[in-house]
Image: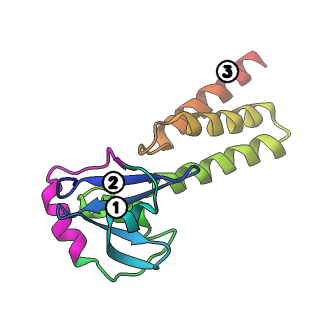
Amino acid sequence: MYPAGTTLRIDLGAFSHYGIADGNGAVIHNSKKRLKITRESYDEFSGGREILSSNITGSKPETAVLMAERYIGMPYDLFASNCEHFVRLVHGLEKESVQIQKYLLVLLGAGIAATSDNNALKAAGGALSIATLLTPSEKSPYKNAAVFSLITAGLVVLAG
């Protein structure tokens, strides 16, 4: 059993699913399957996969459970209220989904690299995608992606 307020994670390959341990053997999470925030057993939450502890936590994890319980029944929305948004919100963190940020930045960078006629933009687009992919999981990729793409574009211009 996990302590109350522990953020739990299920690795689903291309992305992770998150929830909050309630301290009593259940998990409160925003379920895409149920299309709402719900409380389920560890088995229901994990679907047979290994449950991992996440690094997402606030300064008072025990209060995350109280916050999470207030949201039970609220609807699921992939872009505005998914499982990652939910666990960050109840921990008092910025309500964001770094998984969505990463997918969008990788696509943007790849699109720029594939379609631009400008070598500096091509390099910056590739760098944007690479820096995003190299950003540690559960960390926002914006800073790394911006810095790496700007440095790469600058180097191409200087070399050019």
Q: Check the image and report above or below for 136 versus 100.
A: above
Disc 1 element: strand
Please rate how many residues cluster around mark 3, counting C-alpha atoms within 10 Å: few if below 14, some from 14 to 19, many from 20. some
Left or right of residue 71, residue 15 in this image: right
Q: How many marks?
A: 3
In the rendered image, the quadrant that contains the N terminus is bottom left
The label shown at residue 58 is none
Coloring scheme of the render?
A: rainbow
> Mark 2 to mark 3: distance in Å?
41 Å
Q: Which residue is mark 3?
A: 155
Please rate how many residues cluster around mark 2, counting C-alpha atoms within 10 Å: few if below 14, some from 14 to 19, many from 20. many
Disc 3 element: helix
| Region in magenta | 52-69
Q: Which residue is mark 2?
A: 8
- Identify the residue at image location x=35%, y=68%: 29
Q: Which mark sits nearer the N-terminus, 1 or 2?
A: 2
Q: Check the image and report above or below for 98 versus 124.
A: below
In this view, the mark in front (1 or 3): 1
Return the x and y of residue 76 as percentages of the image width and height. 45, 76
Left or right of residue 87, residue 120 in this image: right
Q: Are marks 1 and 2 in contact (CB under 8 Å)?
A: yes
Q: Amino acid at mark 3?
A: Leu
Q: Check the image and report above or below for 52 versus 77.
A: above
Q: Which mark sits nearer the N-terminus, 2 or 3?
A: 2
Is 5 in front, or is 147? 5
Q: Which residue is mark 1?
A: 19
Q: Check the image and report above or below for 23 versus 158.
A: below
